[in-house]
Amino acid sequence: VNHRRQLLNQATLYLFSFDVETSMDREEFGFVPGGTRVTLSARPNLARVYHLYRARTIAGLGYQAIAGTLTTGADSLFWRDDDLEKSGIRATINTQDGATIHMTYQVVADLGPGGYRRLLSARKRDKVGTEDVPIDWPVVTSPRFDTADGRYEWINNYQCLGHGWVQVINSEIRRLTYDVYAMT
Amino acid sequence: MTQPIILTSGQIRQWGERHTPLPRTKAYAFSLDLAFHDNSLTVDFAARRAVAQGSGPGFAKNSRLYHVQDEVLIKSADGAIRNIPQDAQILRASVLVCASPTGGADLQARLLAQWETEAYLSMDVTGVLAPSGSLLRAWSEPRTGRFDETIQTTISVRTECENSSFRWLVQNQLFGWGQLRIRRDGKNKTTAEFTYDLYSMGG
């Protein structure tokens, strides 16, 4: 079979990180075909966008670094009954210099064997994570961005990827932290 | 062959603004080729949109999933040994490319692949075409004469498959780096060839 025998060039460039503390009053839509739908939101003033190294520019691209606050439009989580999470997240980044950047990303995560049942269980002993021993869940996401602000519109042109951790206590998502990279 | 993820506690030493990146790993999974020909391409030059739809034996001949070294097992980013759909044929594909005001283009695609006779893989693809002179020329080029441009593109891929060998593809997004080559020969026959290397990511 004739096909390419060599890998193509590929690289990732670090853009920014963000942390989110989630609000406890999540909206539970309950059981829907194929799983369960839940909407999460961020706690006001507890969601930050920052550069790990506090740099002013993004290494490798030369653009101004992105820092500011983050407000979630809706973290629409869908926990599938085959122990998968397939969610669509929408959030807004308000940068320190007044720009507004819309961020969307899709989450695909393995909830582990029995994870779906455990996340929804009413019995305390079945719940995922405790205050003393929280569970940190690794998550990979695929962010895209939209902005009309000229200082940041370069970011519209990148497919990005996010490496993150989600902290779960009593089957509730309490914190998120992500590093976002541009695929170049 | 699927392996359950092992949940561990206390991975993050300190929550709050960090000074060090989170751990990350990347591993090559397999490659994807798509080749569209004249009658499967529709380009609206005015609106800067292009649609490519492929199906049938002629399309499947040059559109497939494969490993560049013809391996059938790989080590994914989480360290597990995984089956890959080596030499799976793309039965049908639909690609939509829309120019963005910032010079690049958004890409959405849907693929249906068949691996041997055992498994069908449905792949949902989103991504971008990088802004470049090649892309601008592709939108504005005259409709006759030779033409050969290559455009860099990156994608993310989500897969659905009922075969347990490829359950790991359902549980993980793949990320692809690749290129689109648009050619027109002296006989005015146009081809659009996408080729990507897909990688799994881990933390």
Image: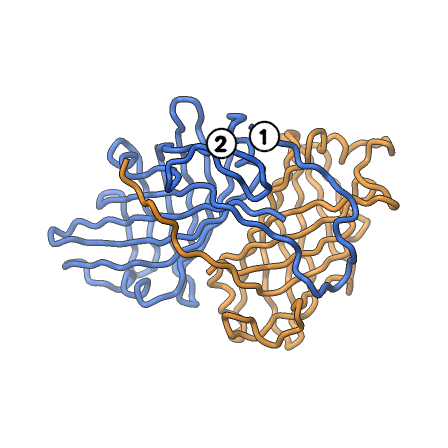
Chain colours: A orange, B blue
In screen coordinates, is A172 left or right of A7? right
Residue at 33% over, 43% down: B34
Where in the figure is residue A123, as x and y percent of width and height?
86, 31
In screen coordinates, is B76 left or right of A125? left
In screen coordinates, is A165 left or right of B183? right
Circle 1 Cα neighbour tier, 10 Å, few/some/many (<14 / 14–19 / ≥20)? some
Residue at 78% over, 58% down: B15
Q: Element at badge 1?
A: loop
Which chain is mark 2 on? Answer: B
Mark 2 to mark 1: distance in Å? 9 Å
Q: Element at badge 2?
A: strand
Which chain is mark 1 on? Answer: B
Residue at 74% over, 64% down: B17
Quarter of the view holding residue A16: bottom right
**Which residue occupies the foreground of this view, B39 or A5?**
A5
Where in the figure is residue A93, as x and y percent of width and height?
64, 65
What amino acid is at disc 1? Answer: Thr
Q: Is residue A53 above or below residue B187?
A: below
Q: Which residue is mark 2?
A: B83
Q: Is residue B108 above or below residue A47?
A: above
Q: Please give the label number shown on residue A158.
A: none
What amino acid is at disc 2? Answer: Asn
Quarter of the view holding residue B62: top left
Q: Please give the label number shown on residue B2.
A: 1
Q: Quadrant of the N terminus of chain A?
A: top left
In screen coordinates, is B21 left or right of A169? left
Discs 2 and 1 lie in a common subunit: yes
